Amino acid sequence: MKTKLTGLALAGLMASNMFSGAYAADDTIKVGILHSLSGTMAISETTLKDAMLMLIDEQNKKGGLLGKKLEAVVVDPASDWPLFAEKARELIEVDKVSAVFGCWTSVSRKSVLPVFEELNSILFYPVQYEGEESQRNVFYTGAAPNQQAIPAVDYLMENEGVERWVLAGTDYVYPRTTNKILEAYLKAKGVAEEDIMINYTPFGHSDWQTIVSDIKAFGSAGKKTAVVSTINGDANVPFYKELGNQGIKAEDIPVVAFSVGEEELAGLDTGPLVGHLAAWNYFESADTDANAQFIDTWHAFIKDDKRVTNDPMEAHYIGFNMWVKAVEKAGTTDPDAVIDALVGVSVPNLTGGYSAMMPNHHITKPVLIGEIQADGQFETVWETSGLVPGDAWSDYLEGSKDLISDWRAPLSCGNFNTATGKCGGSGS
Amino acid sequence: MSRQTSLLYLDGVSVSFDGFKALNDLSLVIAEGEMRAIIGPNGAGKTTMMDVITGKTRPDTGEVYFNGVVDLTGEDEAAIAELGIGRKFQKPTVFESHTVWDNLELALKAPRGPFATLFHVISGGEKKRIEDLLELIRLGDKRNELAANLSHGQKQWLEIGMLLAQDPKLLLVDEPAAGMTDAETAETAELLKDIAQTHSVVVVEHDMTFVRSLGVKVTVLHEGSVLAEGSLDHVSADERVVEVYLGR
Amino acid sequence: MSLLRSLALVIGLLVVALGAGSVPAAAQNDTESLRPLINALADGKYKETEKQIGDLAATGNPVVAPALEALSDGDLYFRKSDKQVFITSKSGEGYALTDPLTLESAGEAGKREVSKIKVNNSLRRVIRSALGSLTLMAADPKVRKEAAEAVFKAKDPDAIEGLDTAIAKETNDEVRLVMEQARAAAVLNSDRSDGEKLEAVEVLSSMGNRDALSLLIGVRDSSTGDLQAAAATAVKRIEKTLALWDNAQNIWYGLSLGSVLLLAAIGLAITFGVMGVINMAHGEMVMIGAYVTFMVQEVIRNSAPGLFDYSLLIALPLAFLVSGAIGVGIERGIIRWLYGRPLETLLATWGLSLILQQAVRSLFGPTNREVGNPDWMSGAFEIGQMTVTYNRMWIIFFALAVFAGLMLVLKKTPFGLYTRAVTQNRRMAASMGIRTPWIDALTFGLGSGIAGIAGVALSQIDNVSPNLGQGYIIDSFMVVVFGGVGNLWGTLVGAMTLGVVNKFLEPYAGAVLGKIFVLVFIILFIQKRPRGLFALKGRAVEA
Amino acid sequence: MMTSFLFRALDARAGLFLIILLALTVAIPASNLLLPETSPLHVPTYAVTLMGKYLTYALLALSVDLVWGYCGILSLGHGAFFALGGYAMGMYLMRQIGSRGVYGDPLLPDFMVFLNWKELPWYWYGFDMFPFAAIMVLFVPGLLAFVFGWFAFRSRVTGVYLSIITQALTYALLLAFFRNDMGFGGNNGLTDFKDILGFDVQADSTRAGLFIASGLALALCFLLCRALTRSKLGKVLVAVRDAESRTRFLGYRVEHYKLFVWTISAMMAGIAGALYVPQVGIINPGEFSPANSIEVVIWVAVGGRGTLIGPVIGAVLVNFAKTWFTAALPDIWLFALGGLFLGVTLFLPKGIVGTVSQGWSALRQRSASAAYEAGSDEPPGSPDAPADVSHKRASSDASPQPAE
């Protein structure tokens, strides 16, 4: 019967595909790139794929690594979270990559975590996130909450005299956690309960009329008000358009955002938004030679002078260079050796300093506060005097204030409880 | 005839769709074992009347009783069918992707619940009954054909067969001769007369020859109510009927 | 926009300067004496800049206004070589320099020769209030009004005297009212007597908007006695009116959301509602319309910047044609093979939507594209205590116009007649000599074209990205089905109902729960009316 | 009675399919566990898990086909039942983590600790016991389907109206599960599972076990569907699909039939979801997304609607294509997938299985009629053993599409 034949042919086809990877050439070092190229997250992640390709290209021009060329393996997890896990497994098991650079959303990272743990590989995660995690196989090159949210709030309190706070976010774990931390932090600073308004919206929310007018109303209580926005990428454009149109000026109610970078502003006329803020660890406007060179290389690589650079790209830049350095130090791409070698590695960042990998697998970064300019860039109006080390476990959350992470021997633990002196969280 | 002794009893039934009165104070009584022909021009309300009796359309006002006691206006199609009213549609509707045999088997009087049908195993008696029906509707050699492949006339007959398989007390037959050849029409009339021996039948038909060959009491519908009632000759003599049919 | 405003300001100031120019020599000297103050801006951090701005404002000389305005806009630079401060504007690779006091051209400078004087929000605030006090006496009433508004926001007690002078001289009632309100705000912030403050509360109470409320709450919470009582009464009164206005606002927001839904759904009401094609690629037609707008603006930006305000008007017909042509192509190439198999149109158009998304992604890149708002689509105005944004207002009008236009086409033109004939009885229509294949293609094209012009409107409020269409497709189907398939009025009423319901739920339930409730409402509503809001009745249903 | 009910399900074609399915179910894990990695016949764990996932998708497609192909109910929201089954299993797996979570809380899952929840919400009770969770896998989707169906079918919501409200249902659930306040982990969903029934979920043997379970579940549900569709009930369903109101006039309560098969189908989808979760290691609200449910419908259409083998083949084929394309053509794979859907619609209107068996029976009919003319054969099939419904549907060009 034909159905049987189809079935058999299918099985054969499948098997041949599954195995094909194993026979690939061995004279290159493979690097996996796990960023969505389609679906809702493509808008942010495709740029990171291109940035990685550029970095790998540049490294090959410098002669590769350990005498071998680097080879990028690109897959498309299509903004489908279980597919991230599947593709991660494919990269590690079938393509035998030495390290993977990828993920954007928290859920995609959570989805691949067990895979990296099981197959003992390395993931570099380049996006600011909610913290509360430290895993042996993952290196977090984006900002933890203490490298972004808390300095931003400090800035608003001190320099703008803000007394009333709107915490607006998309309803998922990063805004939820960040807002929890900020709420605890603000209360610790003496802000009253009724001076904090928390608001959550669905992904891709596009009708902001009600919320913007709520913010306006909240802001008319006689105290200086600011909005702390953890609104996710796509929803920002309509949000800012509504802000601009309803005439909320940065001088009156400034909005500080943690997920709005140069890339998001590229879809906007920023004229009415001048003065609204963002907190990052890198701005394209950073005035350093390394950054100028990075931007030039990027423009040449992408063949478009108008493309902007942003913070997660810098995170990949730092992460990739750290990995290269660690592999050179270890002399092998063996994951265990590289994981050990990575801690303590220090590489230049694009804002004129050095970033180092901490024992908790987070890195040290400067924190910059920038104001949106009419040309779609940010102008740094404040920065931390030194580098801020990323804190995996927030000191402002009850469950995690006693936890620390240190992956060096002999501790080698991602959730060591300093109160009980045991590894494994707070319970046991 | 009173409601209690009737088989089907309609009194003062009105139905309107968006202001158009499809039935207007219609009253009709069918006795046990009676065969009745209903005629009327297009739009007289024949099909709507069938819809009301079988529960498809709820009347705005009026009473509809079956067996003298059962109020049909409160029941749905399935309940009414189970009570013993079978209906054949104007346009033959059979289950085209089932065989002739399966069509009859589905129609055969048997428990109708999902669990009953799930574990249903066809019995010898049922097979015999289906064989008999196949004989009657002359589709014995087509039993394994898909209904979709039948000719128009065969579909009409299959539907009548399905009607009989239900073993209803009252059959509502809507234009059984439509699209048939003369010979088929005559055979259909014979078949209906046979059926009328053991069932009550209401036939809606346009074809006067066919109605004449049935030789039963005739009700003329016009604009949703009864215009005349009596033998075909009697109603044909009625001036108003003539006017309705010819006067335009 | 800000350029226009500063230009108006400069002209206004020039007029002031000319008017006051009876002693030009002295003025000249005065002006030159300001130069060190302005050049001082080249030095120092934000804190010092703030002081320097205060010094400039304290001169009370309107001549410094252009420099401050430029500082606020980020156009004030200093030359590195001699620390001279200039107003700049981009010119080629470098900057054209303008003397900040005389406003005469002062040559050009390369990118690396000058350095920007940095400002931040708090400085902008300081500049705004400084400019406010400086321009209270400008010739243009518009400038005076803006100045008064700025002073209102600054609540600076030092401005009271200036305001008093300005109020005494003011001839324009509207401007005087704003000035009085500004004075009241400043008085409340000062240490003047309670009697004066009570008057101020009175003024603000009759002002009745959120700004006044904000001030009054401050007074209520920080004062005692009569003043507190008066403030409390005023607060209550304003809150009560605002609550009423909130309802109006919600209805407006609801209509606005409804009009967006209507725009998104109306094309689908034709391809799906009238033709029965389960068109999953509908969203992509909307997206293509938005990209056409982007292309039009891109061309205009590069070759005819003056036409920017007309970009949407130019984009409308183009979007209609492009999306419509693609629609006709889809119908001829794919859909026409699938009539009578409506479910398979779902499969095919879903595949198509994937292809179109990827095509746009490959052509234009995955990131958002900037579609600007023309001036007439930006900003807002107030009706009572309700803010009406121009873009939302135009979109409501536009959605209704599209709806009316479509009704007209379907009811009053031969094409509409043919379309209805074909969808109601294809065979009959064909036998009457209507070329049904062409009518099918054109009807599908019409639906797609309307989706395209919806895209033009949606580009004004949403992301222009390959995902644009995906965000609207489900809502569109909900609207068409809720309204009743095949009935355009149903689509209109359905869209507006869902919009208003959503917006009334949102303040209580939040955006997420609000949306869930709307979906549950649709599910329950369909139980009640299994064929939507405007169901066809009678025997036609069975046809 | 029961035996005859099940026995009816088997004929040569179904038997062959089941044998192939069961053979694969045994052979693939065996090769994974027993053969050395160097053997050319060794199936890597990666492939086992992947194929296990395909099998659960196949089961989901089968459940959609049961209502769509046989009863004409086009569900654009079956992903909801799949996800609910998945969540029930996910909750069990979460509870199994116990104090091994990053915070080491013995009772609360990590996401609750970090959102400062103090106690376990009531609806999480009982999920530490596998039997309870297993019952919930069936009960929760079943109950939702029953309630939803009871209202919708009683109100006679049909065609696109029904399709769209199923979509509204899954969309509403998507939004609800996104909310962190619901206590299901919000957008991150449930993840980081440790073990199932005491076995480590990451162990090769557990993966093989899950694969076998998926294969068996698919085989059993296939048999069940086969038995259902070939019983008289199955004939009634097809009658409902083709002429709903005619069926009513025969005295069948159409809404009861629809409700029955709808609920069964939802429970099957729930089983599929429950088997899916431990294999992919995560369940999150994305599974509720309407696009996912539409995709399932497409698998069925590609494979062949109204045949039971079709959806299985369609699901495996489309997902295999997706796996392959996303790795081989990461930048343009949507063109390939979209093209596949278009191609199938235009050139294989009855789906793969439908087209193949149509060709097959045309061939057989030609030889049969040749034999008949030679006077040596009776017409194929007999009333005692009615031939496969789907087979007959496929063999007739004139078979009408159900009214939508």
Image (cartoon, coloured by chain):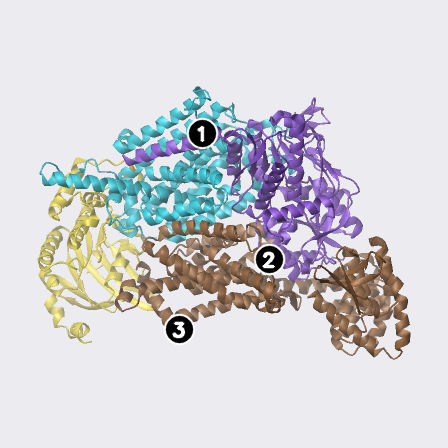
Chain colours: A purple, B yellow, C brown, D cyan
Mark nearest the camera among 3 and 2 is: 2
Crowd around label 3: few <14 · some 14–19 · many ≥20 (10 Å): few
Q: Which residue is mark 3?
A: C412
Q: Nearer the viewer, mark 1 or mark 2?
A: 1
- Please name the amino acid that badge 1 sits on: Phe
Q: CA distance from mark 3 to mark 1?
A: 65 Å
Mark 2 — on which chain does it sit? C
What is the chain letter for disc 3? Answer: C
On screen, residue D386 versus residue C404, left or right, reads left
Q: Quadrant of the N terminus of chain A?
A: top left
Which chain letter goes with mark 1?
A: A
The answer to which of marks 3 and 2 sits earlier in the sequence is 2
Q: Residue C370, labelled with which disc?
A: 2
Give D396 or A55, whichever is nearer the viewer. A55
Task: Please identify the quarter of the rendering in which residue A322 is found.
Answer: top right
Depth check: C304 or A169 in front? C304
Are discs 3 and 1 both within one chain? no
Mark 1, Cα crowd under 10 Å, few <14 / some 14-19 / many 20+, is some
Q: Position of residue A255 (x, y in %)?
A: 70, 53
Q: Is residue C192 visible?
A: no
| Above-or-below relation of D399 to C539 | above
CA–CA distance in space, label 3 to label 2: 39 Å
* Residue type at tag 3: Lys
The local secondary structure at tag 1 comes to helix
Q: Residues within 10 Å of mark 2 (few under 14, many from 20)?
A: many
